[in-house]
Image (spheres, rainbow, N blue to C red):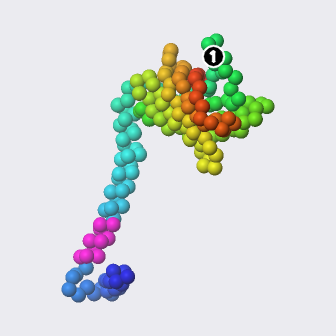
Amino acid sequence: MLILKLVADSALQLSRGTSIPGSGSGWLVGIVSGLVSGVLLLLFSQVWRRTLVPWYEERMYSGVSVEGTWRLSDGDEKQAVDWSQVETLRVNQNASRLTGTQTLSAKLGEPVSSALLDISGGIRDRFVYMTFTAQDRRRLGIGVLLGELVGDGTKIVGHSVYYDTLGKRVDSTRVEYQRIPAA
C-alpha cells in the first residue's frame, strides 16, 4: 500500500511540474521502462516461438508429408473389420509436428454417438504417432496411434489403443487409414 501511495504522490508531483525531493524522477522512469521492455520481450518471444521457429523448421524439414485428410479403412482380406463409426482424420503438419482433428461419425443404426477429438503427435522417418483427446471435456475420449506409412505414402497401418465407451474398457486394434486425394 505504501508503494502505491508513493507512486501516486510521485505522479501527482510530476504532473504539477515539480520534482520528487531527494530522488529526482529517475526511479519512476526506471519502473515504466522496465515494464515496457518486459512487455516487448514477451511479445518478441511469442513471435519467435509461434512464427519464426515453425517457419525455419518447415524450410529445413525434408521428410515425408502426411498433411491432408485420411479415412479409416474397413480392413482387408486378412482382417475383415466392420467399424461402428466412420473415422476421418484431418492432419496439419509443420515439419515433424502433427496437429488436427479426428471426426467420429456413427454409422446408421449404430448405438454410438459422434465425437470430435484433437490430434497432436509427430512423424519420424516413416513412423506416425498421434494422441487423440476429446474436445468436449465432459466426455471420455482418449486414444493413441502408432502407425507406419507404407507403400506410396497413401496408407498408414498400425495399432491404436483407445478407451471403448460402449465396452467401458481400454482396448486396442489394428488400424489402417487411407489418404483421401485432395479435390
Is 125 drawn above or below residue 43 in the view shown?
above
Residue 145 appears anywhere in the view: yes
Q: Principal SS element in the magenta part?
A: helix
Of residues 94 and 122, which is closer to you in this image? 122
Q: Say whether residue 41 is left or right of residue 173.
A: left
Tell me where residue 70 appears, x and y as whole percent: 58, 27
Q: Is residue 98 magenta?
A: no
Q: Amino acid at mark 1?
A: Gln
Name the image quarter holding residue 41: bottom left
Q: Residue at x 40, y 24 (%)?
A: 125
As drawn, the residue found furthest toward the right would be 109
- Disc 1 is placed on an element classified as loop
Q: Residue at x 38, y 55 (%)?
A: 43
Residue visible at 45% across and 33% down in the picture:
122
Location of residue 120 with respect to 159 vertically, above or below = below
Provide residue 111's location: percent of width, then percent of height: 75, 35
The answer to whether 168 is drawn above or below residue 82 in the figure is below
> Which quadrant is home to the C terminus?
top right
**Based on the displayed image, in which of its 4 quarters is residue 118 positioned?**
top right
Image spot of residue 64 (x, y percent): 44, 24
Image position, residue 36 (x, y; %) = 33, 65
The foreground one among 143 and 97 is 143
Question: Disc 1 designates what residue?
Answer: 79
In what quadrant of the picture does the N terminus appear?
bottom left
Question: Between 182 and 148, which is closer to the camera in this rendering?
Answer: 148
Farthest left residue? 22
Residue 69, visible in the rendered structure = no
107 displayed left or right of 2: right
- Crowding near the residue tagged with mark 1, few <14, some 14–19, many ≥20 C-alpha atoms within 10 Å: few
Residue segment shown in magenta: 26-35
- Please report the residue visible at 49 percent of the width from the left and 21 percent of the height from the top: 149
Asked if the magenta segment contains residue 27, the reply would be: yes
